[in-house]
Amino acid sequence: MDKGNGMSYLQSKSQLNQDFPFKIFRYSSQLFKQPMHIHDYVQIAYVLNGVCNHQLRGKSLTVSRGDVFLIAPGLEHSFRAIEDKEFELVLIDFLPFLIAEQLKPFSGTLGPLLYPSEDNVEGAAIPQPWLHIGKNKQILFEHLLQDMQDEFEHRELGYQYAIRITLAKLLILFDRECRKAKRKPAKQPTLVEQQPIDEVKRYINDNYSQDIPLEHGAFLANMAPAYFSHVFKKETGQTFIDFVNEVRIERAMELIRRDAHSITQIGFQVGFHHLSHFIRTFKKRTGITPTEYKKTFRNFP
């Protein structure tokens, strides 16, 4: 239902099957361009490949593989392709009563996202709906998505029950990864609000092995990406990428000194996707290659 005048329109749950209100589908067109909209059902959106744009809570986010969003009813958003950029997006539309019984233990964390109060239909007080699934859990997350799609398409006996169980597993994984991302040393909330860059730095130190795009740091700091980049460099003296890489290299140096893994294993363990990138970044930071560092400092405390 288009509201006109550039305002968002409603995608209604009446579009879902009344007996089993669940749907899973994919988008991959470079011409994909959603208008701003809201829905009165829950939507899970996962970026499977490439990059695209997501407009959410007044922010313009460039999102990539591993980014997942739990979009509550009434939360305005839109996905759009970026010119000349490939992407594949998986969307799940459902009504939360389907898995209400399975998610009872998670009512305190998932509840506000699945059942936002009427006072918060604009999303202002809804918890952060964005999570980046690290590469160590991406395969599991994507396997659960594929299982649901197979069940939904083939519709063999018991498919509705299978989808409910798998959807509950997916949301439990989302909840646990959210808890892991938020785990940090105790600090007064007022200081967190006053020092958002410190909050991002703690997040990087806790999650350096995962993919951490600049947009994720900006979201955590509640800033536009360009402004966040400027503030981060001003406060730390480094670009966001340089800071992330420094944390990774410091951890790599510690692992090399322990001599517990190969150089290749350590590179992947601290968050580098390619060995050549790891070696190049390590040498830029230390002046020597990881192998040279290993020969010099192996078994040092």
Image (tube, grey):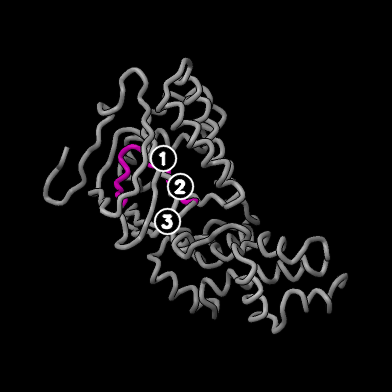
Earlier residue among tags 1 and 2: 1
Question: Which residue of the protein is positioned furthest toward the front in this rendering?
Answer: 154
Q: Amino acid at mark 2?
A: Val
Residue that mark 1 sits on: 44
Q: Please state which of residues 81 and 132 is positioned toward the viewer in this rendering.
A: 81
Up/down of 297 relative to 130, above or below:
below
State the residue position of label 2. Answer: 68
User: Mark 3 or 1 closer to N-term?
Assistant: 1
The part of the chain drawn in magenta is 66-79
Question: In this rendering, which labeled residue sits more in front, label 3 or label 2?
Answer: 3
User: Amino acid type of disc 1?
Assistant: Ile
Q: Provide residue 97's location: percent of width, then percent of height.
A: 42, 24
Q: Is residue 75 magenta?
A: yes
Q: Which residue is mark 3?
A: 50
Q: Secondary structure at mark 2?
A: strand
Would residue 202 be seen by someone viewing this image from the given angle? Answer: yes
What quarter of the picture does the N terminus occupy? top left
Q: Along the horizontal axis of the image, is 260 left or right of 82?
A: right
Q: Which mark is residue 133?
A: none
Q: Amino acid at mark 3?
A: Gly
Report, in whole angstroms, how far the alpha carbon at label 1 lies from the one at label 2.
7 Å
In this view of the protein, which residue sits in the foreground, 120 or 23? 23
Viewer-closest of 40 and 283? 283
> Distance between the Cα atoms at labels 3 and 1?
18 Å
